[in-house]
Amino acid sequence: MLGNKPSKKKVVFQPSNNFLNYLKKYNRQTKLPIQYDDMLRYMASIPLIDSNGKDTLWETVFYDHSELEEVNISLCKIYSLLKTEGDMSVIEHLSVARIDFCTFGNTKPFRVRIINKLNDNYDHFYIKKIDASRIYGLELEGILSPDRLNYLVYDKTLIEEHVAGVPGDDFINKNLDVPKFDQIRIAKEFIKFNERCFVRLLGDMRAYNYIVDITPDIEGSQYRIRAIDFDQQSYEGRKSFYLPQYFKENNPIIYLGIHHLKSETVRQYQLEERSLIARRARSSRSQLNLLLNNMIKDRISYDEKVKKLGSELAEHHKTNTFLKCETMGDIVLNNIKLVLQKEFIQSIIDIKE
């Protein structure tokens, strides 16, 4: 694979006041009892090893006994804010089972495991540094995709719920040896996922940055691919970075499409997903317009990346409109406009080694 990695460590951009007002309007902003920086005060950590003895690149962290109770109560309150809109009556049934810290990647998030003491069932949520581009990615996911991801922001902290599913890399390694009928469904879903990412310019969708939700059906299974990492929303300057089909980690699924699908079928699935995106955009027109108006004004990447991406998309779409774009928000807006006008077709079956 040539030239399809992030150019350098992702830079964090703070949300503008206007964007924070937008988040408040749509109930994403609320006061939190603990911040990301508070979580960094752990006193010790040990590597988290999976069931196969492999290092997960997460570390389980431990806090001083004098702070532990306050940390645990605060985390249970956050879970209540995330899941029950702040109904604190549920807290008496909750406890923190484990707190993990990821040392890999740009975000360095904390993952909190919450247990329901009544039935020992557990759930997770994440505490991350706030980043404007990441939050724009979460908002676009909720508006333009078939999925919703609950999250909250406050000051310099972002809280995200856990998305259940099979990690993409595990799915590719273990779940592709299925009957032809299911392989076709997997290839179809990847085409649609590829389309969703490219339209709203969500980058870096290599296998470990998405999950696959598998639902048993009358015959075979249904598959839904969901992004779980929004760090690279409209940040990089290369067009191919926003097309999951160009990451070599995804090649096994691409091969399924090449083997089972004709070009006419690929085009049909692309048009289907594009029509669904257009329908979602129209049904949330007011919110989408307000979001994009903020995104156009905000700085979420560098000028040279904006210029490069605008140039590559101008060539791709055969229009000079993108050459006039001054921000990533401008580029996203014009990319979505093309979908609404049904003016572009994107091949899914190319493979770049």
Image (cartoon, rainbow, N blue to C red):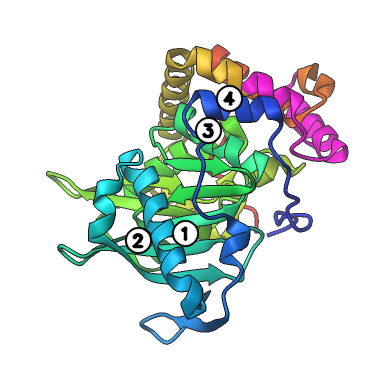
Q: Pointer 1 and pointer 4: residues touching (CB < 8 Å)?
A: no
Nearest to the eye among marks 4 and 2: give it: 4
**Of residues 146 and 320, the one drawn nearer to the viewer in this rendering:** 146
Mark 2: secondary structure: loop
Q: Quadrant of the N terminus?
A: bottom right
At label 3, the amino acid type is Glu
Residue 218 place in picture, x, y as percent? 12, 44
Magenta stretch bounds = 292-319
Q: Quadrant of the C terminus?
A: bottom right
Name the residue that disc number 2 marks. 176
Mark 4: secondary structure: helix
Q: Earlier in the sequence, mark 4 or mark 3?
A: 4
Q: Earlier in the sequence, mark 2 or mark 3?
A: 3
**Of residues 84 and 257, the one drawn nearer to the viewer in this rendering:** 84
**Image height check: is 319 above or below 313?**
above
Q: Earlier in the sequence, mark 1 or mark 4?
A: 4
Q: Earlier in the sequence, mark 4 or mark 2?
A: 4
Name the residue that disc number 3 marks. 139
What kind of secondary structure does the magenta stretch mostly adopt?
helix
Name the residue that disc number 1 marks. 252
Judge whether residue 250 can be spotted in this image.
Answer: no
Residue 212 place in picture, x, y as percent? 37, 52
Residue 45 place in picture, x, y as percent? 54, 82
